[in-house]
């Protein structure tokens, strides 16, 4: 093979090898799951161990999004090692199963799979039920501020109110002012 042909072949093969090595490295590198709480605030999910108190309970969800109301039930198990949710319709049929453990989020659903990223469910859950100190630090890293007043919480970006969370022994209400959705979780949160 002549020098000119060898250089031509090398000029084609070397970039392919380089980009192939970069792509395989990216696949093997474990990226932490995240959710955008604003258009520019990327919140990396905290490990399951940050929960205020473990729960293994039924919750009833009433949600509102774009003038639509939704009702469903869920069974939530959350402790130092895992967050698991089973979403059920009014007849008790499983609509989806979500799991977050060891830095991995998995979600199976024939109903919600196309339009719902499970990282956003975990992020909302963490905003409601995680210890305020590590949660506040994680929010600061993405340019947000956590304010607490008793059990209630507010998440702000500058002066803009993004999330409002009101908690009682029997209900937790989350309002996302930026994305214009809200939901109430009814259950026995006094345990």
Image (cartoon, helix red, strand yellow):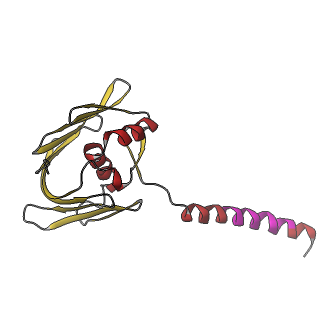
Q: How many marks?
A: 0
Q: Nearer the viewer, residue 154 or 107?
A: 154
Q: Residue at x 33, y 26 (%)?
A: 160
| Residue 39 in magenta stretch | no
Q: Is residue 154 left or right of residue 9?
A: left
Q: Identify the residue at the far left of this view.
A: 91
Specify the segment rendered in magenta. 7-19
Nearer the observer, 29 or 132: 132
User: Which quadrant holds residue 149?
Assistant: top left
Q: Position of residue 71 (x, y in %)?
A: 11, 52
* 41 w.r.t. 156: above or below: below
- Residue 108 sits above or below residue 66 on the image: below
Find residue 34 and report its horizontal and vertical position in percent. 41, 50
Q: In terms of image quadrants, where is residue 140?
A: top left
Q: Residue at x 30, y 47 (%)?
A: 126
Residue 72: which quarter of the image?
A: bottom left
């Amino acid at each position: 093979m002549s020098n000119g042909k060898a250089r031509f072949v090398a000029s084609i093969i070397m970039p392919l090898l380089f980009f192939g090595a970069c792509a395989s490295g990216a696949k093997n590198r474990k990226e932490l799951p995240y959710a955008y709480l604003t258009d520019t605030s990327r919140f990396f999910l905290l490990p399951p161990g940050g929960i205020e108190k473990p729960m293994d309970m039924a919750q009833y969800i009433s949600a509102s999004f774009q003038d639509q109301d939704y009702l469903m039930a869920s069974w939530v198990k959350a402790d130092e090692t895992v967050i698991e949710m089973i979403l059920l319709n009014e007849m008790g049929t499983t609509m989806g199963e979500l799991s977050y453990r060891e830095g991995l989020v998995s979600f199976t659903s024939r109903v919600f799979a196309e339009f719902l990223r499970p990282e956003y469910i975990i992020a909302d859950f963490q905003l409601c039920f995680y210890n305020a100190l590590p949660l506040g630090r994680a929010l600061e890293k993405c340019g947000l501020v956590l304010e607490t007043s008793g059990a209630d919480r507010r998440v702000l970006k500058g002066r803009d109110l993004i999330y409002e969370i009101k908690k009682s022994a029997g209900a937790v209400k989350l309002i996302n002012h930026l994305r214009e959705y809200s939901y109430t979780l009814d259950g026995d949160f006094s345990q």
